[in-house]
Image (tube, rainbow, N blue to C red):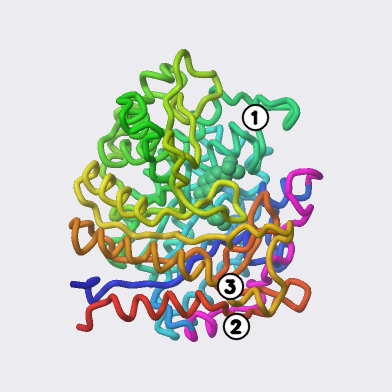
Amino acid sequence: MSLPSDFLWGFATAAYQIEGGFDQDGRGPSIWDTFSKTPGKVADGKTGDVACDSYNNIDQDIALLKNLGAKVYRFSISWPRVIPLGGRDDPVNEAGIAHYQKFVQRLQEAGIAPMVTLYHWDLPDNLDKKYGGLLNKEEFSLDFERYARVMFEALPTVKHWITFNEPWCSAVLGYNVGLHAPGRTSNRDVSAEGDSSTECWTVGHSLLVAHGKAVKVYRDEFKPKNGGEIGITLNGDWAEPWDPEDPADVEACDRKIEFAISWFADPVYFGHYPESMRKQLGDRLPEFTPEEVELIKGSNDFYGMNHYTANYIKHKEGEPEPADFLGNLETGFYSKAGENIGPETQSVWLRPSPIGFRKLLVWLSKRYNFPKIYVTENGTSEAKRGDGEAEPPFPEILEDDFRCEYFRGYINAMKDAVVEDGVNVRIYTAWSLMDNFEWAEGYVTRFGVTYVDYDGGQKRHPKKSARVIGDLFTSLIKTA
Ligand code: GBH
């Protein structure tokens, strides 16, 4: 028993994390340009100005993908490269459009299917300044709808579209914790502005409405002739009870996943927010109008899943904090019995637990009636080293055995979910094709299966894991 013969695998990236070319050919600034240039916001004080310089290296990137055997490549469009001021009446930058058209054409000539994310966090800065960006549902959703239409029009051969990458991150990290652009939070040590108790819920709602509008445009105006698919990509970790004997911990596990994933997936599949969120948040959680339900319910052609790690969950007693976004619970890596969920990595939030991947695939499939799932991100930074150094120097860094083991564990767990549990996964793209700008962590943490020599002209060197993924899928996919 194996994966279906039409299963596609490949790698993923995002525009701001790899492109560079921040002021080339008319690109405007995004909220991440502004945020990363604000002192103290990014660990190493660096920005995406150059990153992997992928904007100027499309042939090299495509050759790399081809060399690794990828069948699909997930990348994102930089909205401010295409519409520098962002708005629905603002001019389109033809050079930006031409760049992506050329890229998609070359990719397809190389036999690699493009999977395009419209929004991976790089909002045109102007829209944030002009009307508060994602906080303004009416303006934002109309501007996003127009931007989406421009891209559907420009790239008619693309068959896989993703509206938003991880709306949870945009809402919570951007407007509650303040760790990501635009960095708003109630924590006045971090930001002069923001209200963690309300803004993230407002932003989540805006993103859902904007998603719904873009999907309607695609289905009404483009899908009939181009025949592609569209969906949203959600992040979420697996949850194990801290004390499996305590029903309150067991219940808190479902609540944890509901606050992370069902916040967006329930509206998309059922047309309403989860009961657990309504109960805790009351009227801080916006209501859907009947028109919004009409737009959002049933708006996924596939479920886009980003998955990295798992946690033990301990329920909290008493009233939740106003800024709480987890569902009144604590997350940790140790159970009551002292079991560790997985080995430490360089990312404080990430410890591998392959079985959690299988369990979450089953959880989602049961709740959402076995949708077609595309795993759009999965990957790891390397094991934490005791010597305080981030990673071994080049070329030892290419021997990323820890990452190889991660992919073996996770991809096999996914295969088990497909073969034994009836889960319907059809595409898998590993995060990431190459080391890149890791948001608030700058370039300190590397998630790539390809090493990028930032001080050596951004040269790419595939690591061991780049091959392991291809070999695994070759052995797991049934030959037609
Ligand atoms: C993905 O998100 C992103 O889509 C991708 O751009 C990124 O490079 C990749 O992860 C690797 O990080 O509050 O500091 O503890 C993964 C989901 C959810 C992981 C939020 C980090 C908490 C960070 N992310 N989570 S923190």
Disc number placed over residue 60 in the picture, else none: 2
Three-letter code for the amino acid on which mark 1 is drawn: Thr
Disc 2 from disc 1: Cα separation: 40 Å
Q: Residues within 10 Å of mark 3 (few under 14, many from 20)?
A: some
Q: CB under 8 Å between callouts 2 and 1?
A: no
In magenta stretch: residue 108:
no
Which of the pair 392/19 is nearer the observer?
392
Helix, strand or loop under label 1: loop
Is residue 252 depicted above or below 101 in this figure?
Answer: above
Q: Residue furthest front?
A: 337
Which stretch appears magenta? 38-67
Residue 283 place in picture, x, y as percent? 43, 17
Is residue 316 depicted above or below 236 in this figure?
Answer: above
Disc 2 from disc 3: Cα separation: 15 Å
Is residue 45 depicted above or below 22 in this figure?
Answer: above
Q: Nearer the viewer, mark 2 or mark 3?
A: 2
Disc number placed over residue 185 in the picture, else none: 1
In magenta stretch: residue 50:
yes
Instruction: Identify the residue under disc 3.
Output: 99
Disc number placed over residue 85 in the picture, else none: none
Which of the pair 162/433 is nearer the observer?
433
Residue at horizontal 60 percent and vertical 52 percent from the top: 347
In this orientation, does residue 88 appear?
A: no
Query: Which of the marked residues, 3 or 1, is nearer the chain's N terminus?
Result: 3
Q: Nearer the viewer, mark 3 or mark 1?
A: 1
